[in-house]
């Protein structure tokens, strides 16, 4: 049984070019290699002329033992949120190599929690952090430097108090963790519209090469350009969102970093005997399939905020309560 070329991981242009020259199956390429000049030119153009390269493309996928994957998963670092309730619900904090979605109505604390995570990802390893940096992609002009400064001051002051119990070498490293260093560790990208959002995501690999300490990517908000920017039909929107999340997932796994995206709520019509509507996360069901963890945030009586875990690959459904203070996200 012949293997179609469409099953090989080749660029679309190469697929079309090979098919136009009569190559429909992998066996066609192998049998004509070095015989037909047109075939030889195409193979050289796409670096497919060597047996080793072609065997790598057609080789079966590698397999892993579930025990090995579990052991790796147990050692994945997590970013704390300064709320024990949220961290406990997430299994210790926001995990690296995953996409976490924060959805909720306006004023529910999505941006506040995102900013807090941008600060917390920079906590030095001597305090139990990962000592990274963050990229904050702002699509709705919600980034507030003054608010970040307040969170940074509180975080750095708390860590300086904890440094008194460290040895001399660790205390020396902790002195470099200041409010200014936290502010410098957040790289803000302001974009407007769907086109700039896609371009910003595509350019993230270059940013990661220039700043190797980046361990967090935040998009606030992912839904805003699609709802308030350029006109976009449902089919294109689904394609764009899937492409963006697919690129982010690849970066998260390959570079061992965390991705946090905020999302809005929209009204969805529920088809039943008595037609009614309900609030649900925007951007359609495809959004829920691509994220690893989904939190629904909402205000509750008394001014506090409740977070409900709607989806978690490693956790059961649960909820947590926290409050937003001048110092940042804290337990009630």
Image: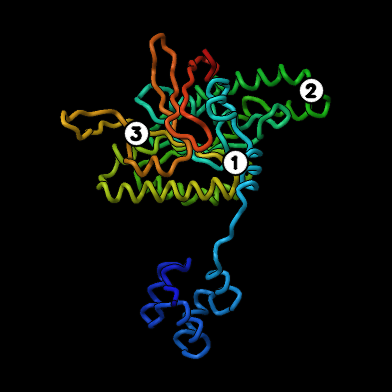
The residue that appears at 39% across and 76% down in the rendered structure is 17
Query: Whole-percent x and y of residue 306?
Result: 44, 19
Q: Is residue 177 above or below residue 286?
A: above
Q: Residues within 10 Å of mark 3 (few under 14, many from 20)?
A: many
Q: Please name the residue that numbered disc 2 is placed on.
A: 166
Residue designated by label 1:
214
Establish if 123 lies above or below 230.
above
Tell me if 130 is positioned left or right of 145 in this view. Answer: right
Locate the N terminus and report the quarter of the image it occupies.
Answer: bottom left
The residue shown at (25%, 33%) is 268
Q: Image quarter for residue 22?
A: bottom left
Could you say which quadrant of the image residue 153 lies in? top right
Image coloring type: rainbow
Q: Residues within 10 Å of mark 1 (few under 14, many from 20)?
A: many
User: Of helix, strand and loop, which one carries label 3?
Assistant: strand
**Image-based side of 152 in relation to 316, left or right:** right
Residue ID at (50%, 86%): 31
Task: Tell me where residue 167 appears, x and y as whole percent.
Answer: 82, 24
Closer to the camera, 206 or 1?
1
Residue that carries the numbered disc 3 in the rendered image: 281
Where does residue 7 sit, x and y in percent of width and height? 44, 68
Mark 2 is surrounded, within 10 Å at the Cα level, by few (under 14), some (14 to 19) or many (20 or more) other residues, namely few
Identify the element where label 1 is drawn. strand
Q: Is residue 210 visible?
A: no
């Amino acid at each position: 049984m012949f293997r179609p070329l469409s099953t090989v991981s080749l660029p679309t242009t190469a697929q079309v070019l090979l098919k136009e020259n009569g190559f429909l199956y992998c066996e066609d390429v192998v049998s004509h290699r070095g015989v037909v000049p047109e075939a030889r030119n195409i193979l050289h153009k796409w670096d497919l002329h060597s047996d080793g390269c072609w065997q790598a493309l057609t080789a079966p996928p590698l397999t892993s033992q579930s025990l090995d994957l579990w052991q790796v998963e147990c050692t994945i670092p997590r970013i704390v949120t300064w709320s024990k309730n949220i961290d406990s619900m997430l299994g210790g904090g926001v995990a690296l190599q995953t996409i976490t979605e924060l959805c909720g109505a306006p004023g529910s604390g999505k941006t506040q929690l995102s900013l807090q995570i941008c600060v917390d990802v920079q906590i030095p390893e001597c305090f139990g952090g990962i000592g990274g940096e963050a990229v904050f992609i702002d699509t709705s002009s919600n980034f507030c430097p003054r608010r970040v400064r307040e969170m940074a001051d509180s975080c750095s002051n708390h860590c300086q108090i904890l440094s008194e119990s460290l040895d001399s070498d660790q205390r020396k490293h902790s002195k470099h963790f200041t409010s200014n260093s936290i502010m410098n560790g957040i790289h803000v990208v302001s974009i407007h519209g769907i086109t700039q959002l896609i371009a910003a995501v595509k350019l993230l690999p270059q940013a990661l090469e220039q700043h190797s300490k980046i361990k967090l990517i935040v998009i606030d908000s992912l839904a805003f350009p699609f709802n308030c920017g350029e006109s976009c039909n449902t089919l294109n929107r689904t394609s764009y969102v899937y492409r963006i999340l697919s690129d982010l997932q690849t970066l998260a796994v390959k570079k061992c970093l965390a991705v946090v995206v905020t999302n809005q709520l929209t009204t969805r019509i529920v088809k039943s005997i008595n037609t009614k509507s309900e609030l649900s996360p925007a951007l359609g069901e495809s959004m829920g399939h691509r994220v690893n963890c989904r939190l629904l945030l909402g205000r509750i009586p008394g001014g506090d905020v409740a977070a409900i875990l709607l989806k978690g690959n490693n956790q059961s459904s649960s909820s947590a309560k926290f409050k937003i203070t001048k110092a940042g996200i804290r337990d009630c």
